[in-house]
Amino acid sequence: MPSPPLPSPAVTPSASAVYAYHELAVEAAGAPHTTELAEEVAVAVAYNGLSQAVMLVSPGDLEDFVVGFSLGNGWIQSIDEIYDIQLSGTGAARQAQVQIASGAFWRLKQQRRQVPGASGCGLCGVEALEQALPRLAKLTPQPLPPADWLLDLRERVRPLQPLGQRCGAVHAALFMDAQGELLLGREDIGRHNALDKLIGALARQRRPLAGGLAIVTSRCSLELIQKVLRAGIQTLVSLSAPTGLAVQWARQHHLNLIHLPQRHAPRVYSPEHRP
């Protein structure tokens, strides 16, 4: 069995930088100010030399992104199918050369699609309904997490969002283990990318998923449900409301789906309440 990919000694870019700006005012503008803004880079991902996608992502945790992107899209079924990751490039243009097992490469070519590099990308580039609505394995039903795990959750996740606190403009995905402890978080300009990075980090660190839950700060739509199902995470908590189709898929696939509104009690959408 191949060993898990080690971090590449490639470029370690900054996730943010300081920029100057002027205030728009009726009177003459004063001295310029500075603020920290989130950065983004274009990453071209190739598998066994075959170009697959170009994505706009935040430049941190790129190895996690590549692993989670591969798992979340179903191109590999296990991190053990990734043999090597080589990152290269400078500035806004980066490359990720990924070596994967022959069986995984065959599957990738069978379902190959080109995904445009947009930070808001969801199902861009999908050419058939079968790709947008794939057949995914159902999870084994699991109990809902204790209600006290979600108390003050919005405040508790903030320390795991350093880039968002400094710059804004980014989404976060986080993981809570089976003891209700927040373990790690990942941030990105793209909500899908943030979840990919989290899934990749969990896989690379060999974290047990049973009994744990993922938390996303963004809108919860179908493609996030699909990524969590493929990863085998049994509960998803969203700080923003889910779409109707996301709820339908969560119920059909036995995924616990909880929305945590700002001023109301947690809302359990899946499993469906049956009086």
Image (spheres, rainbow, N blue to C red):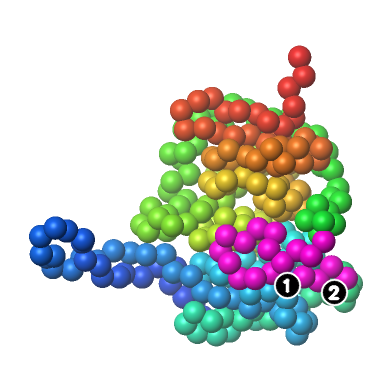
Q: Main secondary structure of the magenta part?
A: loop
Given the current orientation, which residue lies at the most extreme top position?
275
Q: Is residue 169 magenta?
A: no
Q: Position of residue 261 (x, y in %)?
A: 52, 32
- Tell me the magenta residue range: 109-128
Q: Is residue 252 above or below residue 44?
A: above
Q: Is residue 218 above or below residue 114?
A: above
- Residue name at image x 51 percent, y 61 percent: 189
Q: Position of residue 12 (x, y in %)?
A: 49, 76
Q: Please tell me whether mark 1 sits on a helix, a strand or a loop.
A: loop
Q: Is residue 166 above or below residue 92?
A: above
Q: Position of residue 117 (x, y in %)?
A: 61, 71
- Residue name at image x 62 percent, y 66 percent: 65
Say which residue label 1 marks: 114
- Type of the residue with mark 2: Lys
> Quick check: marks 2 and 1 in contact, CB under 8 Å?
no
- Name the image quarter holding residue 23: bottom left
Q: Quadrant of the N terminus?
A: bottom right
Q: Is residue 115 magenta?
A: yes
Q: Dot 2: within a 10 Å radius of its alpha carbon, few (fewer than 14), some, or many (20 or more) residues?
A: few
- Residue name at image x 52 percent, y 52 percent: 172
Q: Position of residue 52 (x, y in %)?
A: 73, 76
- Label 2 to label 1: alpha-carbon separation: 11 Å
Q: Dot 1: within a 10 Å radius of its alpha carbon, few (fewer than 14), some, or many (20 or more) residues?
A: few
Given the current orientation, which residue lies at the most extreme front position?
26
- Name the image quarter holding residue 259: top right
Is residue 236 in view from this perspective?
yes
For marks 2 and 1 on the same chain, the one whose residue lies earlier in the sequence: 2
| Residue 109: image tag | 2
Q: Nearer the viewer, mark 2 or mark 1?
A: 1
- Type of the residue with mark 1: Gln
